[in-house]
Image (spheres, rainbow, N blue to C red):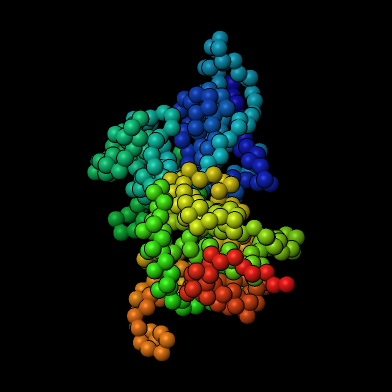
């Protein structure tokens, strides 16, 4: 037997290990060179790893959720059969690292089925949402026949597979069926926290553990802002989508940060240095089928309103469809989060470290308030913010939100150039 030992690639940027997100092969499978064999995730990015050679899989290391050190054996191939052919010579024993393919996010796929099931070879085509549904239902995508274009697996295909579970006995490579399934009994279910969800959990925990959050909630009368929004939507460019409050808030925030640069900061904990930015790179917290992602509107301070709106829409769509690149998901200097119609009265957003501030938009509702000495029905929205109290004093945090409130309540001021004092 001639073996090719493939080791966990060095994925760059100081990574020392990577988490197995999903195997696309198992011992005994025949694979061809450049065929996708495994998806892994580091703290920086998700990566699709192709096969370096053609051959038969002898063994694999790690199940989904396990971490494998860079340079450790990941998968062993028997290349004797291919080496015997005239066109594919292979060394008797070797190790190699082919180029890995970075992707924006990895939706965990379900493990491969046992040999008794009919298993497809090659890349299984399915959306991240359908991959998640399959994983939670314990369905092996490799055994599902897709009815979509090019064999893509659709929701109806999953429904059919779920209706006939005996035909899809999913089993984890190198482990028991229960290890790779979400349902372990009729009353309970177990879902292993892996991939992007694991990374989100770690970062949220680290942020709350290491950052003393200072929360501040302010009530904002957005009646005038709503009037402006409606008027702008009536006269919007033909190729522009309808405006929400979010682009207007981002525009106002870029103006406010001119006077509060201490909130447009990243904390480099390793060096004990605050890195203050002139440019405002606004992270937009976006809910996706794979979990929360934060695509970044870069240099928002230099963009017009419709440019900001278009950027938010484009980046959110790319994040939800798992098409966003790593560069589009990193580098924010301050984050804005909004739950839209689910926004509630108030929230306590968690800071997106290493930033020092995050602004949350809550639901805008009409209610009676005292306005200019009389009771009137006004549209009211709360701003919920959190600040890193190590570097942003409570007074400065409150003053910043008050300044943002002023612009949102008098939105014409958002578009008036700031007068420089002599």
For residue 226, side relative to residue 350 (left or right) = left
Q: From this viewpoint, is residue 207 visible?
A: no
Residue 404: quarter of image: bottom right
Q: In the image shown, does 393 or 99 lie closer to the viewer?
A: 393
Question: Toward the viewer: 234 or 332?
Answer: 234
Q: Quadrant of the N terminus?
A: top right
Q: Where is residue 347? Give x, y as percent.
A: 46, 72
Q: So how many labels did they put on this image?
A: 0
- Is 255 displayed left or right of 165 in the figure? right
> Measured from the top left, where is residue 176 in percent x and y?
42, 44
In the image, 419 versus 25, the foreground residue is 419
Residue that appears at 72% across and 59% down: 270
Q: Is residue 256 above or below residue 48?
A: below
Residue at image coords 56%, 24% = 53
Image quadrant where one finds the C terminus: bottom right
Where in the figure is residue 323, as x and y percent of width and height? 48, 43
Q: Nearer the viewer, residue 98 or 322?
A: 322
State the residue lying farthest toward the top: 86
261 is higher (above) or lower (below) than 140: below
Residue 389 sits above or below residue 10 on the image: below
Instruction: Give x and y (percent) for residue 284.
Output: 51, 58
Residue name at image x 37 percent, y 78 percent? 378
Q: Is residue 329 above or below residue 79?
A: below
**Residue beneath the point at 74% across and 63% down:** 273
- Whether residue 306 appears in this view of the structure is yes
Q: Residue furthest bottom?
A: 373
The quarter of the picture where residue 379 lies is: bottom left
């Amino acid at each position: 037997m001639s073996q090719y030992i493939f080791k966990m690639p060095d994925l760059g940027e100081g990574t020392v290990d990577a988490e197995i997100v999903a195997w696309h092969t198992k011992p005994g499978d025949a694979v061809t060179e450049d065929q996708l064999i495994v998806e892994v995730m580091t703290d920086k990015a998700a990566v699709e790893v192709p096969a370096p050679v053609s051959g038969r899989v002898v063994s694999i290391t790690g199940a989904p959720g396990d971490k494998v050190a860079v340079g450790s054996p990941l998968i062993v191939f028997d290349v004797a059969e291919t080496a015997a052919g005239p066109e594919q010579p292979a060394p008797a024993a070797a190790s190699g690292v082919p180029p890995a393919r970075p992707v924006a996010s990895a939706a965990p796929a379900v493990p491969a089925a046992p040999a008794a099931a009919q298993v497809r070879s090659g890349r299984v085509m399915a959306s991240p949402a359908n991959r998640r549904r399959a994983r939670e239902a314990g369905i092996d995508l490799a055994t599902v026949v897709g009815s979509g274009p090019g064999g893509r697996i659709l929701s109806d295909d999953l429904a059919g597979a779920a209706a006939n579970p005996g035909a899809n006995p999913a089993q984890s490579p190198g482990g028991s069926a229960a290890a790779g399934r979400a349902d372990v009994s009729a009353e309970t279910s177990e879902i292993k926290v892996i991939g992007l969800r694991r990374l989100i959990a770690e970062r949220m925990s680290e942020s709350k553990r290491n950052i003393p959050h200072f929360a501040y909630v302010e009530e904002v009368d957005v009646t005038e802002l709503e009037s402006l929004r409606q008027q702008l939507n009536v006269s919007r460019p033909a190729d522009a989508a309808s405006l929400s409050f979010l682009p207007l808030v981002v525009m106002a925030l870029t103006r406010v940060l001119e006077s509060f640069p201490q909130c447009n900061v990243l904390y480099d904990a390793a060096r004990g240095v605050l890195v203050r930015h002139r440019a405002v790179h606004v992270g937009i917290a976006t809910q996706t089928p794979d979990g929360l992602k934060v695509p970044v509107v870069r240099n928002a301070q230099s963009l017009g309103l419709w440019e900001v709106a278009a950027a938010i829409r484009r980046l959110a769509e790319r994040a939800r469809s798992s098409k966003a690149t790593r560069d589009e998901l990193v580098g924010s200097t301050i984050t804005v989060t909004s739950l839209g119609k689910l926004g509630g009265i108030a929230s306590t957003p968690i800071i997106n470290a290493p930033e020092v501030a995050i602004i949350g938009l809550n639901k805008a509702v009409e209610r009676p308030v005292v306005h200019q000495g009389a009771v009137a029905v006004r549209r009211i929205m709360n701003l919920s913010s959190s600040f890193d109290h190590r570097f942003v004093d409570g007074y400065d945090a409150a003053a910043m939100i008050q300044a943002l409130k002023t612009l949102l309540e008098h939105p014409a001021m958002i578009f008036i150039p700031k007068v420089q004092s002599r």
